[in-house]
C-alpha cells in the first residue's frame, strides 16, 4: 500500500519535528508520488530562492500579519492563518474579512499538525513570523511550497508584490498599490497646517512605552502623508517597536501622540489578557497617567493624545493596514 502525497508530507513533518525535539536525524517515509497534473510556475522569493508553486493557488495559508493582509487585499480567502502579534485572534482590522477562517497556531508558534491537516497548496511566511528559521521553514516545506515574502521592517510595497507574485495576481497587486497612492494624495490636501507639527506613535505595554519608528507601517504611513516625526523618532529601527525607559520618557513626546497598546499580551504569550482595541488604549492611557512625568508631556497637556487600535497602529501589516492608517489620520486630523 502506498501513502498519498499529503500523508507522506505529514509523516515527514512529524518525523522532522520529532528529530528537532530530540536532537537526532533519520526518518523516512514512502517515496513522494509523481507530481500531479496541476500546472505550476517558478517564483523567486525575497531571499532569491526559486520556488515552484501552483499556477493559481487555491488553498493558501498566510502565516503572518503582512501576508494575511496581502492575501485579503487581493480578494483571496485563506483556508487558515495565525493569530496576530500579542492577540488571541487575527488583528482587529482584519476580523470582518476573516470570519470562518480557522487559526492554525500563533504568529510565532505555527501549529504544524493543523497546517498539514488543512492541505494547503501554498504557504506564505516572512520575517515577522518564522523569521527565516531554517528548521521551521524546512518543516513547512514538507507540507506545501513555501514562499518567503519579506523581512521584518521591509518596505510594505515590496513585500506585498511578493505576495501578489506568489498568487499569480501581479496586475491586481499593482492596482491595489495605485489605489493606495491615490488615497494618500487626496488625504495630504486635507491636512493643511498639521503637516508643520510633529507626530509620535507609542505602544504602551504595562508600565512602559515603546516607539513605532519609520520602518513599520504606521511610520511609513506618516512619511507618505508628509507628517513630521520628533527628532528622536525621525529614524529607522530594527523592524519592531523600540522600548523607551521611563528615565527617557520625553522621547515619546510630540505635538500629537498616536497612542495604542496590545494589552498585556506578547508574541510568546498571546493569552495574557488585555485588549488591542480602543478600549484597551483607554485603559493603557489611564495606566500611563500614573507614571511620573507622563502628564507633563506636551501632547498630554494640549489634549493631543489620539487613541488608536493597537493591532493596526503598533504592529505590522500590508495594504489593507496602510489604507486603514491613512483613514485614521484623515478622521483624526483632516
Image (cartoon, helix red, strand yellow):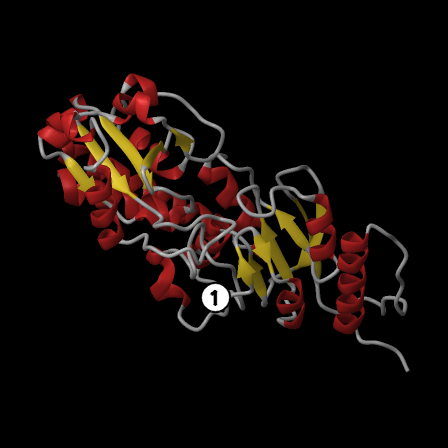
Q: Residue at x 32, y 29 (%)?
A: 223
Residue 88's spot in the image, x, y percent?
Answer: 43, 60
The quadrant in which residue 151 appears is top right
Tag count? 1
82 to 330, vertically: above or below: below
Tell me if residue 27 comes above or below residue 154 in the rendering. Answer: below
Q: Element at badge 1?
A: loop
Identify the residue under disc 1.
77
Q: Position of residue 165 (x, y in %)?
A: 57, 49
- Position of 301 with respect to 263 (left or right) is left
Residue in the image at 17% along x and 23% along y:
197
Quarter of the image that includes the N terminus: bottom right
Residue extending farthest bottom: 1
Tell me if 280 is positioned left or right of 83 in this view: left
Image-based side of 190 in relation to 205, left or right: left
Q: Nearer the viewer, residue 3 or 53?
A: 3
Q: Of 19 and 174, which appears nearest the observer?
A: 19
Q: Which quarter of the picture shows residue 222? A: top left
Left or right position of 35 against 54: right
Amino acid at each position: 500500500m502506498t501513502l498519498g502525497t499529503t500523508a507522506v508530507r505529514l509523516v515527514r513533518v512529524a518525523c522532522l519535528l520529532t528529530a528537532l525535539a530530540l536532537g537526532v536525524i533519520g526518518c523516512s517515509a514512502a517515496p513522494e508520488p509523481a507530481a500531479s497534473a496541476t500546472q505550476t510556475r517558478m517564483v523567486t522569493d525575497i531571499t532569491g530562492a526559486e520556488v515552484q508553486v501552483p499556477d493559481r493557488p487555491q488553498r493558501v495559508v498566510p502565516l503572518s500579519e503582512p501576508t494575511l493582509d496581502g492575501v485579503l487585499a487581493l480578494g483571496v480567502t485563506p483556508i487558515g492563518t495565525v493569530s496576530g502579534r500579542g492577540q488571541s485572534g487575527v488583528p482587529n482590522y482584519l476580523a470582518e474579512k476573516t470570519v470562518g477562517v480557522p487559526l492554525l497556531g500563533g504568529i510565532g508558534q505555527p501549529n504544524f499538525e493543523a497546517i498539514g491537516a488543512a492541505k494547503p497548496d501554498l504557504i506564505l511566511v516572512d520575517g515577522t513570523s518564522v523569521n527565516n528559521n531554517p528548521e521551521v521553514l524546512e518543516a513547512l516545506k514538507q507540507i506545501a511550497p513555501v514562499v518567503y515574502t519579506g523581512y521584518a521592517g521591509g518596505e510594505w510595497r515590496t513585500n506585498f508584490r511578493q505576495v501578489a507574485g506568489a498568487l499569480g495576481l501581479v496586475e491586481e497587486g499593482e492596482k491595489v498599490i495605485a489605489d493606495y497612492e491615490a488615497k494618500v494624495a487626496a488625504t495630504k490636501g486635507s491636512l493643511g497646517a498639521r503637516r508643520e507639527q510633529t507626530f509620535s506613535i507609542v505602544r504602551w505595554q504595562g508600565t512602559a512605552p515603546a516607539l513605532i519608528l519609520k520602518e513599520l507601517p504606521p511610520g511609513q504611513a506618516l512619511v507618505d502623508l508628509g507628517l513630521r516625526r520628533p527628532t528622536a523618532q525621525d529614524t529607522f529601527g530594527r523592524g519592531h517597536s523600540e522600548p523607551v525607559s521611563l528615565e527617557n520618557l520625553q522621547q515619546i513626546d510630540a505635538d500629537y501622540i498616536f497612542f495604542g497598546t496590545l494589552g498585556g499580551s506578547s508574541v510568546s504569550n498571546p493569552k495574557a489578557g488585555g485588549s488591542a482595541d480602543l478600549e484597551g488604549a483607554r485603559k493603557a492611557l489611564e495606566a500611563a497617567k500614573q507614571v511620573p512625568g507622563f502628564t507633563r508631556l506636551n501632547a498630554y497637556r494640549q489634549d493631543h493624545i489620539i487613541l488608536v487600535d493597537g493591532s493596526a497602529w503598533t504592529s505590522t501589516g500590508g495594504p489593507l493596514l496602510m489604507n486603514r492608517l491613512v483613514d485614521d489620520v484623515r478622521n483624526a486630523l483632516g
